[in-house]
Amino acid sequence: MMTGNIALVNVHSTRNVGDAALTEVAIEKLRDQFHNYRITLVMNDPSSYQGQEVTVNSFYNWVYKYNNHLAVRFIFLLIISTFSLLTYRLFQKPIYLTKSRDLLATLDTIFEAHIVASTPGGYLYSYGRGRALILFAFTLAICVLAGKPLYLLPQSIGPFKNWFERIMIRWPLSRARIVMVRESVSLELIKSLNISDNRCRLFPDMAFAYRGKPPADAIKWLRSINIDPDNDRPLLGITIMDWGSQYQGFKAQKQYEIAVAGITRHFNNRYYGNILLFPQSWGPTENEDDRIPAKRIQMINSDMVKFIHLVDDPVPPDLLKSIYGQMDVFIGTRMHSNIFAMTQNVPVIPIGYLHKTIGIARSAGIEDWVIDINDINSELLINKFDELWKMRHQVRQQLENRIPILIEQINEVGPAIAQDFRDWNDR
């Protein structure tokens, strides 16, 4: 019976519900194939994780831990990692030039791993300054240089701002065993980097396979906030994010929030419904806390406080997914909130802030309902919503037919890794 270690790297934070769901599904699919392997999560925010797996700090966490002297800390990381890597390759035992427990735990996890999987998601793109991307790419490069079989679980890749970022990403991706992407735009991008076709695989986003709580739990929760699902219909669910704070290139945050505030008023005035503003993410940093922009939406429509319900307390991912299933229509900027709703056949208007949104919407057959965040305004959003409302039953049926096919495809992720790993071991 084979045993070993798996390092799941580049995991962000379970304070982001999408990341939490992706992490859980990734662990489940790996465990299905590698029953007796120990899985260690290399995380940016390890304190957020409440599951059974071991966690260690990521390189990103170590560099940004005190948010000062970042350049000095990165140079120190580069020196320590390079020396330990050289000694590991020469003697199969690393020699460390530091006593930092966090850094030692991260490097030990990589050197002791028999398999390295880079977590599913959408983190390999230009952030503006590029520092985060450097650290994610650096993590992948260390794994490759340590001689570990590297597998990138389904994710979006790009966009990149300049040639340096493309080269930096191309190096580890071209040496990975399998690069799985979750939408066709990313597939075309990595092919443009001249990465071999036999390394590239297209799979759906793994959150399509995430399981929620039974509907009865969602109904109970709605009643706990004084919404009666039998009488307070229709229900509109919304997720909003502060993209302007997370991405320097976006300058229309105010226009975007005004548009979302406008659809809440329109929905109540025309359809006499209740609106729920959900936090899909509440950290670990302030600009990742969806409750902050949601409160601004509520303030814009302060005269509608009776009908706009801001969910202030974080809700567990499996329950949150079930609650989304009780919505009549959903408008989501957080992409995994859209996936949670779609998997329960709820019609969705995705607001796209990167190409991953249109790509994943296309995989579910709802690309016609996507609105680019750079183009959004109240009139456009209201018109799109009214059109979707008229067609909501057809869209429900379309999702009901499509989602099971995507879940079947996700079930092939684990076997694909297991087969390739056997081939790698037998060479």
Image (cartoon, rainbow, N blue to C red):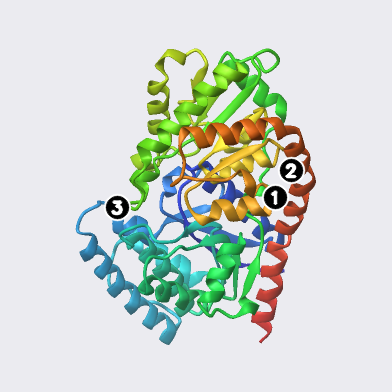
User: Closer to the observer: label 3 or label 2?
Assistant: 2
Does 308 appear above or below 147?
A: above
Decide: marks 3, 2 in contact (CB < 8 A)? no
**Relative to 160, residue 382 above or below:** above
Question: Mark 2: which amino acid?
Answer: Leu
Q: Which residue is mark 2?
A: 399
**First in sequence: mark 3 vs mark 2:** 3
Q: Residues within 10 Å of mark 2 (few under 14, many from 20)?
A: some
Residue 185 screen position, x and y as percent: 57, 63
Q: Amino acid at mark 1?
A: Gly
For mark 3, does the 10 Å Cα neighbourhood hold few (<14), some (14 to 19), or many (20 or more) residues?
few
Rendered image quadrant of residue 190: bottom right
**In this figure, which residue is indicated by the disc labeled 1?**
365
Sequence-earlier tag: 1 or 2: 1
Looking at the figure, which quarter contains the N terminus?
bottom right
Q: Quadrant of the C terminus?
A: bottom right
Q: Tell me what residue is drawn at x 35 percent, y 55 percent.
A: 61
